[in-house]
Amino acid sequence: MADELTIHHLGRLTQATVRGGDAQLKKLRNALLLKEFRITAERENILELRRRAYLTQDDWPMQVIVRRDGTRFEIDYYLYIPWGWIVAFTVLMLLVLPFAGIPNAPLAFGLAVVVAALAIYKQKFDCRPNARFWQERPRRRWNEIMARLLREAFAHP
């Protein structure tokens, strides 16, 4: 079993802490690479990985950040809405709505502004097992996947 694995869901991200060494970090890194994550930054004590969206499979982009302090690992992971999507939605809203011929265009514009503001405000989502409403299934699924990967990687023989 994993040595002192604790997982906390903090609203905007999920944070796991565990103790281990180089072998366990390598196991976790390889397991994430098999799940189609890509390394975005790798420094002495920090490893950052991202996974692209698979929207047709109800899977949103995800980021994992592993920080190491001796034998203590702090792993942050969350699903998120990329800034590119928010900017593209806003630009389309400003360019298309005035010329779309939509009845009550000011109402549609107001709703689009609310949606853009909500996307900016709630850009990151933790992976809690009891997630409700926004991205419920991917958040629950990634909670199970990440907990399993962490237990397997940091299990001591």
Image (cartoon, rainbow, N blue to C red):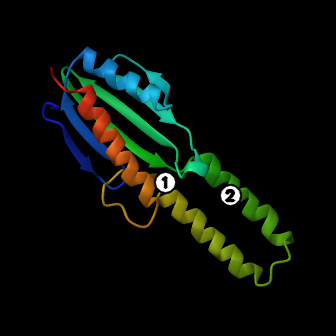
Amino acid type, mark 2:
Phe
The crowding category of the residue bearing disc 1, from other C-alpha atoms within 10 Å (few below 14, some 14 to 19, many at least 20), is: some
Closest to the observer, 92 or 28: 28
Q: Quadrant of the N terminus?
A: top left
Q: Left of 115 or right of it: where is 125?
A: left
84 over 91 or under it: above or below: above
Q: Left of 153 or right of it: where is 53?
A: right
Question: Which percent across, then down, holds residue 116?
Answer: 60, 63
The crowding category of the residue bearing disc 2, from other C-alpha atoms within 10 Å (few below 14, some 14 to 19, many at least 20), is: some
Q: In this figure, which residue is indicated by the disc labeled 1?
A: 123
Amino acid type, mark 1:
Gln
Q: Left of 152 or right of it: where is 109?
A: right
93 over 123 or under it: above or below: below
The answer to whether residue 121 is visible is yes
The answer to whether residue 125 is visible is no
Question: Which percent across, then down, holds residue 9?
Answer: 28, 51
Question: Which percent across, then down, holds residue 62?
Answer: 47, 42
Residue found at x 46% / y 32%? 35
Closest to the observer, 54 or 76: 54
Q: In this figure, which residue is indicated by the disc labeled 2?
A: 89
